[in-house]
Every structure is written in structure tokens, then in C-alpha cells.
Image: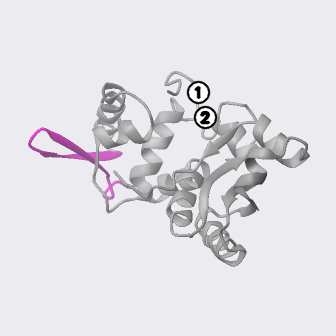
């Protein structure tokens, strides 16, 4: 469960990381209508918290809601003059989680994937400058060429270098003396959602 009171370190003009994640998800999936229930599950937060943040964003005209009976669906407000600039800001800050999840879910042989390094540090609240690149650890047997292709596509969307490092599941779980893996394990890391079950 994330701290909804913490100040966003990826985009400090936002009230909280949850606002960044919520906006990034709806703006980077503009054709999808996301239910409050599914968004709460995706971000491991209560439905009431998502609903409260959604109320603020709807009131500000940044997202729009559609009601289908008792179901409340949220979408990016693509008619807003802020759509273009806001999408770009969200892509640069909170976009890596969404973009990499969308791309890596289609690569066979991945059992786990993580963003580590400076982006993960900012995501978890460590202050510092906006990351210049995105470091990704892929666990499994995915083909290196497929990972390279996914990284290049991610770079095009995110506007920065994406470095992918692949390790076997055995190495990830059983290499206590590997300095690289020890460093990745000991520092903040973000688990990339590979399920592909968009809200």
C-alpha cells in the first residue's frame, strides 16, 4: 500500500505519486475506460482514495467520467488544451511503468521484470533530478533481440535511453555474491506489471 500523502519525486508539482500514476495510466491508455475498482486494484490502494482523487481530477477537467449503472469509468479528457503537454510530462515521469509493462508483456520468456536505478529511487520517494535513462532487469529466458526491440520502442515513446539487463531465474534467486544483483536487490526497484490486464 503506497503512502498517498507523500510528495511526488518524479513530478513534484503533483500532490502525490498516486495522482501521477492515475493520470499516467489514463493518459497513456486514452482509448480505455478504467473503472475505479480496477484502478484501486492496479495501484494497491482503496477504492475510496482513488474515487476521491478522481473527483479532484474530474473537477479540474483533466479526466472525464462515464457512468454505466453503478460503474464509474474514468478516461483522459482529450478535449482539454492541456492534453498534449500533460501527456508528454506524464510519459517522461510516470510513463516508464506503463510503457514497459505494455511492451514487455508481449515478450516470451519473462518471469519477472523490474525498473531499478534512479527512476525507481525517485518513484519510491528519494529526492533527486529526473532520471536520464531507465534501467530494467528482466528475469527469465527472453530472447535478447526481442528485449532489444522492446527497449528501442520504449525509448521512442519515453524520449530517453532504456537499458535492459537479462538474468536467469536461477541467478536472480541464487547469486548472493554477484555484486550487480546484490545492488539491484538492495536498492529500490519497481515491479513491472506483465499481466496485461488493463483496467
Q: Is residue 69 magenta?
A: yes
Q: Is residue 83 left or right of residue 191?
A: left
Indicate whether 125 appears above or below 74.
Answer: above
Q: Which residues are magenta?
A: 62-81
Q: Residues within 10 Å of mark 2 (few under 14, many from 20)?
A: few
Residue under label 1, please give it.
7
Residue at x 36%, y 45% (from the top left corner): 62
Q: Are marks 1 and 2 in contact (CB under 8 Å)?
A: yes
Q: Quadrant of residue 184?
A: top right
Q: Nearer the viewer, residue 73 or 112?
A: 112
Residue under label 2, please give it.
12
Q: Quadrant of residue 55?
A: top left
Q: Position of residue 121 (x, y in %)?
A: 72, 38
- State the SS at label 1: loop
Q: Which mark is residue 164?
A: none
Q: Nearer the viewer, residue 166 or 61?
A: 166
Q: Residues within 10 Å of mark 1 (few under 14, many from 20)?
A: some
Q: Position of residue 74 (x, y in %)?
A: 28, 46
Q: Nearer the viewer, residue 134 or 103?
A: 103
Instruction: Please identify, in this view, whether the residue under mark 1 or under mark 2 is nearer the observer.
Output: 1
Q: Earlier in the sequence, mark 1 or mark 2?
A: 1
Residue at x 59%, y 56% (from the top left corner): 111
Q: Nearer the viewer, residue 169 or 129?
A: 169
Amino acid at each position: 500500500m503506497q503512502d498517498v500523502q507523500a510528495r511526488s519525486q518524479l513530478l513534484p508539482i503533483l500532490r502525490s505519486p498516486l495522482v501521477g500514476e492515475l493520470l499516467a495510466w489514463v493518459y497513456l491508455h486514452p482509448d480505455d475506460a478504467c473503472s475505479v475498482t480496477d484502478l484501486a486494484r492496479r495501484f494497491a490502494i482503496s477504492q475510496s482514495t482513488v474515487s476521491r482523487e478522481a473527483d479532484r481530477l474530474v473537477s479540474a477537467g483533466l479526466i472525464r467520467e462515464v457512468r454505466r449503472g453503478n460503474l464509474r469509468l474514468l478516461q483522459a479528457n482529450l478535449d482539454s488544451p492541456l492534453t498534449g503537454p500533460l501527456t508528454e510530462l506524464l510519459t517522461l515521469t510516470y510513463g516508464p511503468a506503463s510503457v514497459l509493462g505494455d511492451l514487455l508483456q508481449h515478450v516470451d520468456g519473462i518471469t519477472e521484470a523490474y525498473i531499478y536505478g534512479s527512476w525507481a529511487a525517485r518513484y519510491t520517494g528519494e529526492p533527486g533530478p529526473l532520471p536520464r535513462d531507465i534501467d530494467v532487469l528482466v528475469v527469465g529466458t527472453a530472447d535478447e533481440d526481442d528485449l532489444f526491440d522492446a527497449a528501442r520502442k520504449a525509448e521512442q515513446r519515453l524520449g530517453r535511453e532504456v537499458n535492459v539487463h537479462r538474468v536467469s531465474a536461477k541467478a536472480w534467486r541464487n547469486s548472493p555474491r554477484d555484486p550487480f544483483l546484490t545492488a539491484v536487490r538492495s536498492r529500490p526497484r519497481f515491479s513491472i506489471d506483465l499481466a496485461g490486464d488493463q483496467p
